[in-house]
Image (cartoon, helix red, strand yellow):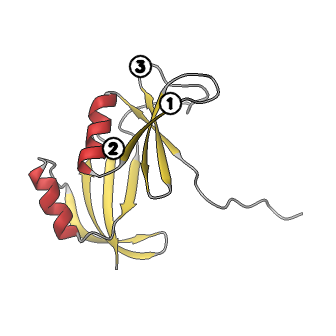
Amino acid sequence: MATPRLTALDHLVLTVADMAATLAFYGDVLGMQADVFTPADGSTRHALCFGQQKINLHPAAAPFDPKAARVTPGSADLCFLSDTPLADWQAHLGRNGIPIEQGPIRRTGAEGPILSIYVRDPDGNLIEIANPV
């Protein structure tokens, strides 16, 4: 019998210490759309949307079940692809007071070579912004 196969990533979850700071960073700095939704349990939750992707946000003080074994703000390392040239990103990040930790530097993404810069979100997650090359 063949091994079942996955086809896509539907969403991922970030545990955050400060919801407002996270929403501001990902919305104002990275251009994602904040979304408030109500799942089947009737609670109110927050998410970030961009393209066909979604990041659900769980507050560190009260993460939703089920959850990861060790919910910890700042433990993620995420790479986002962009068609905007990295020079434009560098200028935009500078205007927003976001320091670039590294880059531009060549890396390898899921579909081949990328050119990347690295920043940190309010929780210290490593955020890679990359252009395919």
Q: Amino acid at mark 1?
A: Arg
Q: Position of residue 33 (x, y in %)?
A: 37, 46
Q: Secondary structure under badge 1?
A: loop
> Could you say which disc has been placed on residue 61 in the image?
3
Few, some or many residues within 10 Å of mark 3 (<14, 14–19, 20+): few
Q: Which corner quadrant holds the C terminus?
A: bottom left
User: Relative to 7, is 4 on the left or the right?
Assistant: right
From the image, tell me which residue sits under label 2.
125
Q: Position of residue 109 (x, y in %)?
A: 43, 69
For residue 114, which quarter of the picture? bottom left
From the image, tell me which residue sits under label 1.
70
Whether residue 54 is situated above or below residue 123 in the rendered picture = below
Tell which of 91 and 102 is nearer to you. Answer: 91
Q: Identify the residue at horizontal 16%, vertical 62% (top origin).
A: 90
Q: Is residue 124 visible?
A: yes
For residue 91, which quarter of the picture? bottom left
